Image (cartoon, rainbow, N blue to C red):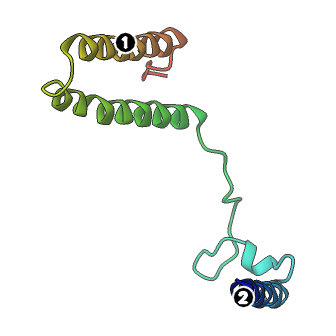
Amino acid sequence: MLSILTISLIILIISMVVMFIASILSKKPLVDREKSSPFECGFDPKSSSRLPFSLRFFLITIIFLIFDVEIALILPIMLIMKFSNLMVWTTTSIIFIIILLVGLYHEWNQGMLNWSN
């Protein structure tokens, strides 16, 4: 038992020393202007490349991802129907679909599904 504790302590000390040496050796300079600027064929950029992106596009992508995950959750429900209690399966499916419809209604009500803007 004492040898296992001794070996564990030695391994712990060696790993701590290696992590400490790695953190000291991996220090990078703070900021380099050339590395932080965008590269455009060797020329200085004409304008800022850090333009803000459309928040509307971001929200549409989030909605797409949510509905994509919902589809991935709905597909196994059909396979489970054979193996589970029909009443429990129906109740769970109806609750899940109601939650999806309430979310869709909320997004529609907030105007997130208007593509013409």
- Residue 42 picture location, percent across and down: 63, 83
Residue at horizontal 39%, vertical 17%? 100
Q: Is residue 105 above or below residue 42?
A: above
- Residue 79 picture location, percent across and down: 16, 32
Q: Helix, strand or loop at disc 2?
A: helix
Residue at horizontal 29%, vertical 16%? 93
Mark 2 neighbour density, 10 Å: few (under 14) some (14–19) many (20 or more): few
The quarter of the displayed image where residue 56 is located: top right
Q: Earlier in the sequence, mark 1 or mark 2?
A: 2
Mark 1 neighbour density, 10 Å: few (under 14) some (14–19) many (20 or more): few
- Residue 117 picture location, percent across and down: 49, 22
Residue 11, label in figure: 2
Identify the amino acid type marked 1.
Ile
Residue at horizontal 73%, vertical 79%? 35
- Residue 114 picture location, percent across and down: 44, 18
Give the position of the N terminus as an image quadrant. bottom right
Q: Is residue 111 above or below residue 6?
A: above
Q: Helix, strand or loop at disc 1?
A: helix
From the viewer's side, name the closer residue of 102 and 79: 79
Q: Nearer the viewer, mark 1 or mark 2?
A: 2
Query: Quick one: which residue is furthest to the left in this view?
Result: 82
Q: Is residue 72 left or right of residue 3?
A: left
Q: Disc 1 versus disc 2: distance between alpha carbons?
A: 53 Å
Circle 1 sits on which residue? 95
Residue at horizontal 76%, vertical 89%? 6
Q: Is residue 89 left or right of residue 60?
A: left
Q: Is residue 76 left or right of residue 100?
A: left
